């Protein structure tokens, strides 16, 4: 699994539940460009989804860390790596693989992903930092790379059946959505963009994105770019069935279809009070009661508020060489 003549050290932080170690080891050995590297291996665990193994890998001198797992593994690895000189490579092995999708990286092709890791090019991307305030007044600090949110999306994540997700992939979220949509409870919150005024609202969800695309090719945040130094915020606040229709048209048709076309930039946007989309560098949210929060698709308990900031160019990602 290693080459003692190598001058560079790579580390594979892998989720042993989602990754076949023997097959992956063989694939690394079969990658010609990997011969120039010493490769170390660090498994994650139920108690440590990746932060600890990543620290061990960096302490061992790894200049590149390959995250082999789902979005949760990638997020945990990146949380430790941001701001370091090491490069993050992705070996998508999960259901969503949202960062890989947003970077247009190859999915379900281990050989290509490894070639990208060992012989690719570096690209700087942003990371997002979130301070989550709990009901007891404590504050947790985390990072995310794709999206964070509270309300409808967080409830969907916490209600998704993991066994069903293994069988049918992202379609399992649809079942959870049907269940969650029966809950008519709205969030009451205040939010502030940068140094602007506090905005009070009753909403179904507020989502903060570093990337814009979801599974099934749904473009939630069409203006989001992973390297623009900005956060993209969408506040979903329909008050009626008509409002929900406006949300669907805005996201599925306008964002998902029209804005992908060359002529889309010249088309007047749908005006609706049911969706508010903005950009900022800092977002502060205060809730009237504890609500569930999700980071990159994983439930993170309940919060009473949060502060989200963008860290421009904080992470170096491996992408295919041109």
Image (cartoon, grey):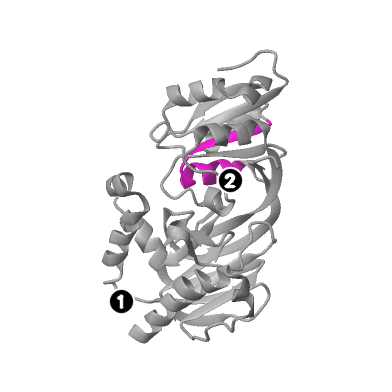
Q: Is residue 165 left or right of residue 299?
A: left
What is the magenta range?
63-80
Q: Is residue 64 magenta?
A: yes
Point out the residue furthest to the top here: 4
Is residue 234 one of those drawn in magenta? no
Q: Is residue 253 above or below residue 116?
A: below
Closer to the camera, 190 or 177?
Answer: 177
Q: Name the spot of residue 204 as percent of width and height, x first.
A: 40, 74
Query: Badge 2 is on which residue?
Result: 79
Name the element at disc 1: loop
Nearer to the camera, 124 or 30: 30
**Residue in view at x 49 percent, y 79 percent:** 275
Q: Residues within 10 Å of mark 2 (few under 14, many from 20)?
A: many
Residue at 58% x, 24% y: name it.
31
Residue 20, image x, y percentages: 41, 28
Q: Is residue 312 visible?
A: yes
Secondary structure beneath dot 2 equals: helix
As drawn, 295 above or below 284: above
Q: Earlier in the sequence, mark 2 or mark 1?
A: 2
Q: Which residue is mark 1?
A: 184
């Amino acid at each position: 699994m290693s080459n003692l003549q190598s001058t560079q050290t790579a580390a594979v932080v892998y989720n042993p539940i989602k990754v076949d170690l023997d097959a992956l080891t063989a694939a690394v050995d079969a990658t010609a460009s990997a011969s120039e590297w010493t490769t170390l291996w660090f498994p994650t665990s139920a108690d440590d989804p990746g932060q600890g193994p990543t620290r061990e890998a960096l302490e061992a001198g790894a200049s590149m860390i390959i995250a082999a797992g789902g979005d949760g593994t990638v997020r945990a690895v990146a949380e430790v790596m941001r701001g370091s000189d090491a490069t993050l490579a992705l070996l998508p092995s999960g259901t969503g693989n949202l960062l890989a999708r947003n970077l247009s990286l190859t999915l379900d092709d281990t050989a290509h992903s490894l070639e990208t890791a060992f012989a690719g090019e570096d690209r700087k991307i942003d990371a997002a930092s979130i301070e989550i305030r709990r009901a007891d007044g404590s504050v947790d600090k985390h990072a995310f790379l794709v999206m964070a949110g509270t309300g409808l999306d967080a409830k969907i994540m916490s209600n998704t059946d993991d066994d069903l997700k293994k069988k049918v992939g992202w379609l399992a979220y649809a079942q959870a959505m049907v269940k969650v949509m029966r809950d008519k409870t709205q969030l009451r919150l205040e939010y502030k963009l940068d140094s602007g005024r506090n905005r009070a609202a009753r909403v179904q969800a507020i989502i903060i994105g570093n990337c814009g695309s979801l599974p099934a090719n749904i473009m939630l945040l069409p203006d989001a770019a992973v390297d623009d130094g900005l956060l993209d915020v969408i506040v979903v606040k329909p008050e009626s069935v008509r409002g929900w229709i406006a949300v669907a048209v805005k996201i599925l048709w306008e964002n998902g279809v029209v804005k992908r076309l060359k002529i889309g930039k010249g088309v007047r946007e749908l005006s609706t009070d049911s969706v508010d989309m903005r950009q900022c560098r800092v977002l502060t949210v205060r809730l009237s009661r504890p609500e569930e929060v999700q980071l990159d698709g994983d439930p993170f308990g309940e919060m009473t508020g949060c502060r989200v900031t963008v860290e421009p160019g904080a992470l170096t990602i491996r992408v295919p060489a041109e």
